[in-house]
Image (cartoon, helix red, strand yellow):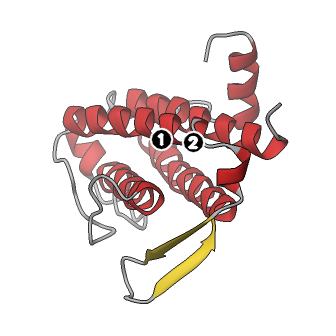
Amino acid sequence: MQSLLKQHFDTFARYNAWANTRLFDAAALLSDADYRADRGAFFRSVHGTLNHLLVTDRVWMFRFTGEGDSPDRLDTILFEQLESLRHARETEDARIVRYVTGLDDASLESAITYRRVSTPEAITQPLAPALAHWFNHQAHHRGQVHALLTGLARRAPELDLLFYQRLAEKGVA
């Protein structure tokens, strides 16, 4: 039987993909000007913030697996067009789900060693808290995109974890 911690991370991996899909659906309804407009967010725009989320997911997946692309700047614009960014996001989300659901309890108790993007020192830490940070970071920046969408479109998608869990329980998430 899986531990509660394992179940927790599996849920967050699936929730992450679901929430990203909803954000991209909403972003696709914006005009290109609104999508790219500097609205004062840390990564300026919906476009900049969605790119940042993909950048950091790639950085963390490289740290976790030693595979894939690991950009060297957190504000890198990986894709200029929303559809290309969306396709890459879907691919990365599937990779994240495969990785996280493939972990076992022993893996969650292991440690990882990595270097930060901004500093050269090596950091070693347990995997489970690193995963917790990563999922929290994703929610933080999705919240920024949600706020931008609310301001731009006056309507943003429901992203609450409990909403996702209710849909997943019904088999529709």
Q: Count the marks: how many? A: 2
* Relative depth, front residue between 108 and 91: 108
- Residue 154 visible (yes or no): no
Q: Quadrant of the C terminus?
A: top right
Q: Which mark is residue 45?
A: none
Q: Residue at x 57, y 42 (%)?
A: 100
- Residue 60 screen position, x and y as percent: 45, 59
56, above or below 113, in the image = above
- What residue sits right under mark 1 in the picture? 96
Secondary structure type for disc 2:
helix
- Residue 55 screen position, x and y as percent: 34, 57
Determine contact: label 1, label 2, CB under 8 Å: yes
Question: Separation of disc 1 and disc 2 at Cα?
Answer: 6 Å
Three-letter code for the amino acid on which mark 2 is drawn: Val
Left-right relation of 142 to 7: left
- Residue 29 screen position, x and y as percent: 34, 27
Q: Quadrant of residue 38?
A: bottom left
Dot 2: within a 10 Å radius of its alpha carbon, few (fewer than 14), some, or many (20 or more) residues? many
Three-letter code for the amino acid on which mark 1 is drawn: Ile
Q: Quadrant of residue 160?
A: top right
* Relative depth, front residue between 134 and 121: 121
Left-right relation of 88 to 99: left
- What residue sits right under mark 2 in the picture? 100
Dot 1: within a 10 Å radius of its alpha carbon, few (fewer than 14), some, or many (20 or more) residues? many
Secondary structure type for disc 1:
helix
63, above or below 8, in the image = below
Q: Quadrant of the N terminus?
A: top right
* Relative depth, front residue between 121 and 83: 121
Q: Residue at x 58, y 57 (%)?
A: 140
* Relative depth, front residue between 55 and 33: 55
